[in-house]
Each structure stands twice: as C-alpha cells, then as structure tokens.
C-alpha cells in the first residue's frame, strides 16, 4: 500500500513538473541572435514560429513571450529551416532577425519568437560525429541501426574547428533522408561527411562542416 502511494506521488510530481515547464520561448529582438537552450540530457523540439514589432516585446527578457502579429509575416521557408537547424540539439544559435526572414512588414524593428519544448534524449541513444570529408562509422554490436537524427552542416561554434565560429546555422535539407536510406535496418554502415554525399548545406558559408548522427540499436 505504501509502495503504491509513493509511486502515485512520484508520477504526479513528474506530471506537475512537465506541466509547470510547458512551452519555452526565445524572442530575438533586432540585433540579437536567436538562442534556444535545453537542460543537459534534453533536446529541442521547435513547436511554432511567429514575429512582431519590437515595441510589443520585452527585449530585456527574451524568455518572456511577446505579443505577436496575427499576420503571416515570416518567410515560409523559415518554418522548415529553423527545425532543421535546432531540433534534436541541446542548444542552437540562429541568425539575427534580417530582411530575408520576412515577406511582409519587413523592417529593422521586427523580432522573431520561437516556441519550443525540451524532451528527454532517447535511452540508449548513441552519437557519432565526423568532420567534413571524413568518414563516420555507425555500428550496432547487436540489433539493427535506427537513425533518430542526422545533420550535416554547422550547428556549433567549436566542433571540427580550431577557432570558434559564429556562423552556426547552416544545414543540409537532404542529409537525414540520405543517412536513413543508407543505414536504417542494418548492423553497420559508413558515411562520407560531404556535400556530395549528403546534400549542400543552406545557406552556403565558407566554414568547416560536419556530420552529426544520433542512432539507437533496435
């Protein structure tokens, strides 16, 4: 009986913790890079993107949701590109608001708001990284490979570079599909970290790229 009560209390506490956190917000005002961050052991999942004018945001508190515009002012491509860059990472950094992000009411006073949640990394998940033009080797000692996430581009200041880089937001739209096609359902595979093999990152920056693969053995 006591054991049952303890279990119920623990479950309720976990549920309350989830509810209390809910959605997280990042509001990047003019001149500020977007910054999404999850606690250690958790990863980002982008839920929604919106925008508005600087006067409707508290730029001193970027975690506080702003009053967003009802108009569809963000470029539609942003809604695919930001999850490509940020999803399944513990932290991501995005460009400052700029005219390429908007289709209407483009001005220097626009902010970008990203609503996101942090979810736990899958138990048993392994990560393999390979710098540009190197080979990544993915292997399961038992079971078969199941790709959770695959990114090719640049998403971090320090990976595969001797000098910290500020351009941390370029990724290949086709990398994950290509990696899954080659590796899912088998015991081992090799991948070349290159634009030719995985698709060119967008936007195109002259910085060292890398491949990042999360997988489980199923």
Image (cartoon, rainbow, N blue to C red):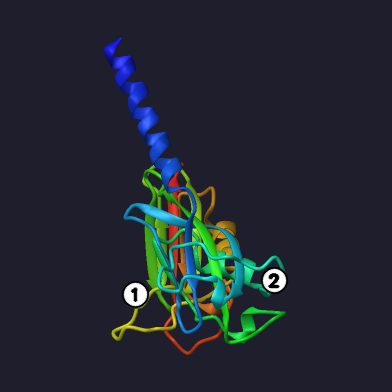
Closer to the eye: label 1 or 2: 2
Q: Residues within 10 Å of mark 2 (few under 14, many from 20)?
A: few
Where is residue 3 shown, x and y percent of the image?
28, 16
**Contact (CB < 8 A) between labels 1 and 2?**
no
Q: Residue at left 38%, top 67%?
A: 129
Q: Secondary structure at mark 2?
A: loop
Q: Nearer the viewer, residue 191 or 77?
A: 77
* Residue position for label 2: 76
Quarter of the rendering occupied by the N terminus: top left
Q: Residue at left 69%, top 81%?
A: 105
Q: Is residue 162 left or right of residue 133?
A: left
**Quick check: 217 above or below 11?**
below
**Quick check: 12 above or below 203?**
above
Q: Residue at left 33%, top 82%?
A: 161
**Quick check: 131 above or below 16?**
below
Q: Quadrant of residue 60?
A: bottom left
Closer to the N terminus: mark 1 or mark 2? 2
Q: Nearer the viewer, residue 48 or 208?
A: 48
Q: CA distance from mark 1 to mark 2?
A: 30 Å
Where is residue 144 shown, x and y percent of the image?
47, 45
* Residue position for label 1: 159
Q: Nearer the viewer, residue 63 or 130?
A: 63
Tag on residue 14? none
Where is residue 13 shown, x and y percent of the image?
36, 33
Q: Secondary structure at mark 1?
A: loop
Where is residue 78 shown, x and y percent of the image?
62, 72
Q: Is residue 55 left or right of residue 216?
A: right
């Amino acid at each position: 009986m006591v054991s049952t009560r303890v279990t119920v209390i623990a479950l309720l506490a976990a549920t309350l913790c989830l509810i209390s956190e809910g959605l997280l917000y990042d509001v990047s005002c003019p001149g500020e890079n977007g910054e999404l961050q999850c606690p250690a052991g958790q990863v980002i999942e982008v839920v929604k993107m919106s925008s508005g004018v600087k006067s409707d945001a508290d730029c001193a508190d970027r975690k506080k949701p702003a009053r967003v515009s009802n108009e569809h002012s963000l470029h539609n491509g942003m809604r695919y590109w930001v999850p490509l860059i940020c999803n399944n990472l513990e932290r991501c950094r995005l460009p400052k608001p700029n005219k390429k992000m908007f289709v209407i009411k483009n001005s220097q006073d626009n902010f970008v708001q990203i609503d996101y949640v942090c979810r736990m990394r899958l138990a048993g998940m392994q990560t393999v990284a390979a710098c540009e033009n190197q080979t990544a080797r993915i292997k399961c000692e038992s079971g078969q490979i199941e790709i959770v996430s695959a990114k090719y581009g640049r998403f971090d200041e320090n990976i595969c570079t001797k000098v910290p880089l500020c351009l941390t937001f370029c990724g290949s739209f086709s990398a994950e599909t290509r990696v899954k096609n080659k590796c899912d359902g088998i015991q081992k595979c090799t991948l070349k970290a290159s634009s030719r093999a995985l698709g060119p990152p967008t936007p195109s920056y002259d910085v060292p790229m890398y491949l990042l693969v999360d997988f489980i053995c199923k």
